[in-house]
Image (cartoon, rainbow, N blue to C red):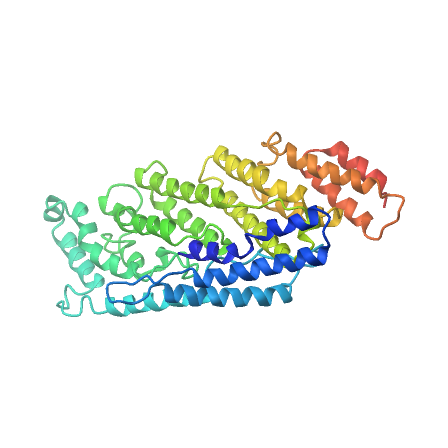
Amino acid sequence: MFAARWMHGERAVVNLPDCFIIVGRGGAEPAAAAAAERAADSAEADLLSNLPEKLDEFGRDENVELREEMSRRAHKRQKQYRHAPAQPQGAAEERWGDATTDESDSEVTHYRSKRAEALEASASVFADASEEYGSLAAVKHRLEQWKLQQPGAYADAYMSLTVPAVMAPFVRLELLQWDPLLGGSAGFDSQSWYKHLFEYGLNGDSSTSGNGSDPDEELIPRLVTQLVLPLAAHSLQHAWNPFSRHSTAAAKAMLEDLLIYVPPEDAKLQDLLYTVRQRLEKAVASTRLPPWPAAAIATSRRATIFLARRFGKALRLLHSVLAFDGFLPRSVLQELALKQLLQHQMLPYLIAGPAAVAVAVDRASRVLAELSTVEGLIQGSSRLLEPFLDFLSAKARALEAQQNKHIPGNVQLAKQLAQMLMALGSAVRSQQLLAAYPS
């Protein structure tokens, strides 16, 4: 739903390229800008009027909330056009979309409200159970006493295989409170069921723990595989936002926790990783950065912000893809990050951007910063990065052509670009640029 609502909001600029034809045919820039703004306003209005009634079984219009949310987003965008976001020191242009996500405040509030209602209702699940069976601690104590007093009967009853099913209702109930992607950084190992059952069956004797002699030592791994893993799969499929840095960091931390208890070759865990891959592939396939001409974009601030937001969103997705290094094969990361995202979407946007070297270097540095987060990726992907290196080399030539003009800031810009060329393995080109701008 989050993605669908974002797509509705972004369609307000779909007619802008048609308006840019005015500039391409030699028309006046004010006329092009006015035409672009009119097209965007018209498209914005169409979004709110083209949503028909969608009645549920009680006769309520399901699109009411969507219209209200779209109206709030439209108002927010109008304010954004007038006020630039906070910029990092040294940024060459306004940076839109670097830290935003696709969830609105109202959507998150709605989710948390419904979740609170579910948790309130769950509190009464064991309300009518007797005291000796109404809590995990009581059931655990009863089984541990049986094991201590009659170990033979306990073993003959194959209780080590049965205990996970006995404890499952209590674990499931508490796992309702586990919200790995939106609820904070606390893992399932911070919950009380985990702490209660971590040393189940030892009866105060930790000397045998870890030697494999007691099958009850596998209780936690079994519960994680049977109960936690399916919840994690559901979260990744339906709650994880690949365009959110925070959500991706939480998803990665969740996978790291799971790998402590579930072997990598486990079929369910492999299915989980395949879900991650599918979500990333779908997100990459949906990413579009139209390479509109810089001269045309300059006529409309709305178009400038639109593309900047798209670029910021692509950067967030690039970060998410690379975050799963070690979980997904390196070849998959190279295909998604370097080929489909960088070569097919981001690089054409960079090439079609403003002629100003400072802006081009600033944008490219943000891409390189993400690529540098994965150890060995740049060194092992030289062929895939050749087009990106060619782009930076072209900017180096442009900078060298200005060396006698004594433009303020070019010396520092040359140093930054030289460092980027060096990071991409072009040491000779880096030295040539530094020679043109000696300190």
- Residue at left offset 59%, top offset 37%: 343
**Relative to the observer, which residue lies in front, 220 or 141?**
220
Left or right relative to 202: residue 325: right
Left or right relative to 224: residue 95: right
**Relative to the observer, which residue lies in front, 86 or 352?**
352
Left or right relative to 143: residue 211: right
Q: How many badges with numbers are in the image?
A: 0
**Relative to the observer, which residue lies in front, 218 or 245?**
245
Q: Is residue 340 above or below residue 45?
A: above
Screen quadrant of the N terminus: bottom left
- Residue at left offset 56%, top offset 52%: 15
Q: Is residue 135 above or below residue 188?
A: below
Residue 429: percent from the left, percent from the top?
A: 76, 34
Q: Is residue 324 visible?
A: no
- Residue at left offset 33%, top offset 43%: 262
Residue 185: percent from the left, percent from the top?
A: 44, 58
Residue 76: percent from the left, percent from the top?
A: 54, 66
Q: Is residue 430 visible?
A: yes
Residue 432: percent from the left, percent from the top?
A: 81, 35
- Residue at left offset 69%, top offset 34%: 390
